[in-house]
């Protein structure tokens, strides 16, 4: 899927904002969880490879395109990134913070504090 989006981007058929990187990360985590019936979601490798796969499928200058993709992330990407973290069942102890992945009101937080 991300490779197809990279090819579309290289042809000018979509913009970086259309990629929805956060959503793609979340979908990969969900698919991995489903395929393995729980366990390691390979979150780290997903986070590393999705931008690189997009970059390599879009351009010979993969590093530049991957960097531009990361820089183009928005509020929706941040929200989906947090959903992906939560869906991956991280095992570390909860940190008492507004940005804690276990904060059920994270979408509201991002709406009130637009960061990505």
Image: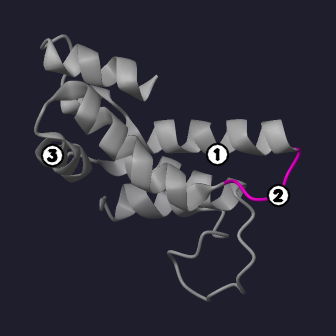
- Where is residue 103 shown, x and y percent of the image? 63, 69
- The kind of secondary structure the magenta stretch mainly shows is loop
Magenta segment: 37-41
In the picture of the structure, the residue carrying the numbered disc 3 is: 68
**Local secondary structure at mark 1:** helix
Whether residue 12 sits left or right of residue 25 in the image: it is: left
- Where is residue 8 shown, x and y percent of the image? 25, 14
Query: CA gap, disc 2 to disc 1?
Result: 11 Å
Q: In terms of depth relative to the viewer, which is nearer, 17 or 54?
A: 54
Q: Which residue is drawn at 57% across and 76% down?
A: 100
Q: Residue at x 67, y 60 (%)?
A: 86
In the picture of the structure, the residue carrying the numbered disc 2 is: 39
Mark 3 Cα shell of 10 Å, populated few (<14), some (14-19), many (≥20)? some
Note whether 45 is above or below 19 in the view shown: below
Task: Place residue 78 in its image quadrant.
Answer: bottom left
In the picture of the structure, the residue carrying the numbered disc 1 is: 29
Instruction: Please report whichever mark, 2 or 1, sits nearer to the chain's N-terminal start.
Output: 1
């Amino acid at each position: 899927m991300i490779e197809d989006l990279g090819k579309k981007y290289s042809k000018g058929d979509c913009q970086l904002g259309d990629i929805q990187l956060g959503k793609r990360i979340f979908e990969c985590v969900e698919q991995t969880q489903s395929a393995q019936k729980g366990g390691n979601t390979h979150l780290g490798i997903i986070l590393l490879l999705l931008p690189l796969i997009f970059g390599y499928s879009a351009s010979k200058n993969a590093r530049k395109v991957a960097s531009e993709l990361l820089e183009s992330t928005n509020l929706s990407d941040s929200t989906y990134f947090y959903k992906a973290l939560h869906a991956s069942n991280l095992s570390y102890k909860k940190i008492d913070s507004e940005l804690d992945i276990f904060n059920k009101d994270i979408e509201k937080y991002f709406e009130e504090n637009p960061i990505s």
